[in-house]
Amino acid sequence: MPVYTWVAETRKGRTIKGDIEAVDEKSAALLLKRRNLTVKKLKAKPKDVFEGLSFMQPKVTAKDIVIFTRSRGSRSWRNRPRTRPSGGSSVRSSRMWRGAPAWQRP
């Protein structure tokens, strides 16, 4: 069924916009009338131009996302590889290794 874009007014005078799916324009107007709306504009919604073009479709599939997220799940901050500080004996590096066993200290 085609989709129609509409602009209507309520009984209180408030303007409302929206989309409605109906068989034809007459039935769309009837559906809006049943909602106690006065139709100002009603026209068929234009179709998506890029729908039939395969090169404009997204290249990432749901399967790709699942594989990526599962492979990234084990790499959290706590599971990061431990490395030694690079060269020099700074105050920060001595504080960082304070509780470490002797064989791990620089």
Image (cartoon, helix red, strand yellow):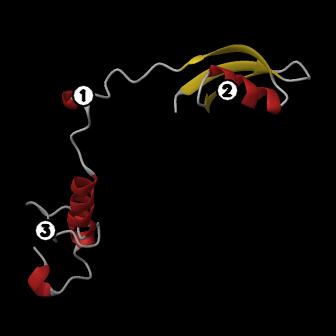
Amino acid carrying mark 1 in the image: Met
- Left or right: 70 with respect to 103? right
Disc 1 element: helix
Residue at 13%, 86% in the rendered image: 102
Q: Nearer the viewer, mark 2 or mark 3?
A: 2
Question: What residue is pinned by disc 2?
Answer: 28
Residue at 24%, 49% in the rendered image: 61
Q: Position of residue 83 (x, y in %)?
A: 13, 68
Disc 2 element: helix
Q: Residues within 10 Å of mark 2 (few under 14, many from 20)?
A: many
Amino acid carrying mark 2 in the image: Ala
Depicted 20 relative to depicted 90: above or below: above
Question: What residue is pinned by disc 1?
Answer: 56
Disc 3 element: loop
Q: Nearer the viewer, mark 1 or mark 2?
A: 2
Residue at 60%, 24% in the rendered image: 24
Depicted 106 relative to depicted 5: above or below: below
Residue 78 quadrant: bottom left
Does the rendering let one see residue 17?
Answer: no
Question: What residue is pinned by disc 3?
Answer: 83
- Left or right: 29 with respect to 33? left
For marks 3 and 1, give the CA distance: 44 Å
Depicted 13 relative to depicted 72: above or below: above
Does the rendering let one see residue 47?
Answer: yes
> Earlier along the polypeptide chain: callout 2 or callout 3?
2
Amino acid carrying mark 3 in the image: Thr
Residue at 85%, 23% in the rendered image: 10
> Earlier along the polypeptide chain: callout 1 or callout 2?
2
Mark identifier at residue 44: none
Q: Quadrant of the C terminus?
A: bottom left
Q: Residues within 10 Å of mark 1 (few under 14, many from 20)?
A: few
